[in-house]
Image: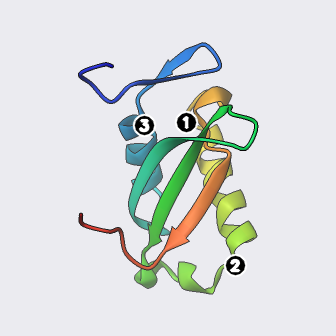
Amino acid sequence: GRNDDQVKIRGFRIEPGEIAARLVEHAAVRDAVVVARQDRAGEQRLVAYVVCASEAGSDGLDGSELAGTLRTHLSARLPDYMVPSAFVHLAALPLT
């Protein structure tokens, strides 16, 4: 185990907090958390949990539109291996 939050996915060391920070830069995002989760095949994948900013009008976006918008936003700022494979819209992040 590491003392920091880095995870290793497909041979790359990734800091999920850095990805979350780039997500929050988007006007449609109020808060975000990125974690590494195992898929059914046992592979590690990045998943972004996103709370939308209601003042940005992002509540009207459906899941695929929001995911596409955020994927494009991150692709312009981060390497491909740091773009999450899934985006989950939440009403609020759990505090515990």
**Mark 1: which amino acid?**
Arg
Residue holding disc 1? 77
Mark identifier at residue 64: none
39 is higher (above) or lower (below) than 79: below
Tell me which residue sits at (42%, 76%) in the image. Answer: 53
Quadrant including the N terminus: top left
Q: Nearer the viewer, residue 58 or 20?
A: 20
Classify mark 2: residues with Cα within 10 Å, few (<14), some (14-19) or many (20+): few
Residue holding disc 3? 16
Question: Which tag is nearer the camera, tag 2 or tag 3?
Answer: 3
Residue holding disc 2? 62
- The first of marks 1 and 2 along the sequence is 2
Tell me which residue sits at (55%, 36%) in the image. Answer: 77
Which element type, helix, strand or loop, lies under badge 3? Answer: helix
Q: CA distance from mark 2 to mark 3?
A: 24 Å
Q: Position of residue 90 (x, y in %)?
A: 48, 73
**Mark 3: which amino acid?**
Pro
Tell me which residue sits at (48%, 63%) in the image. Answer: 50
Q: Position of residue 67 (x, y in %)?
A: 67, 61
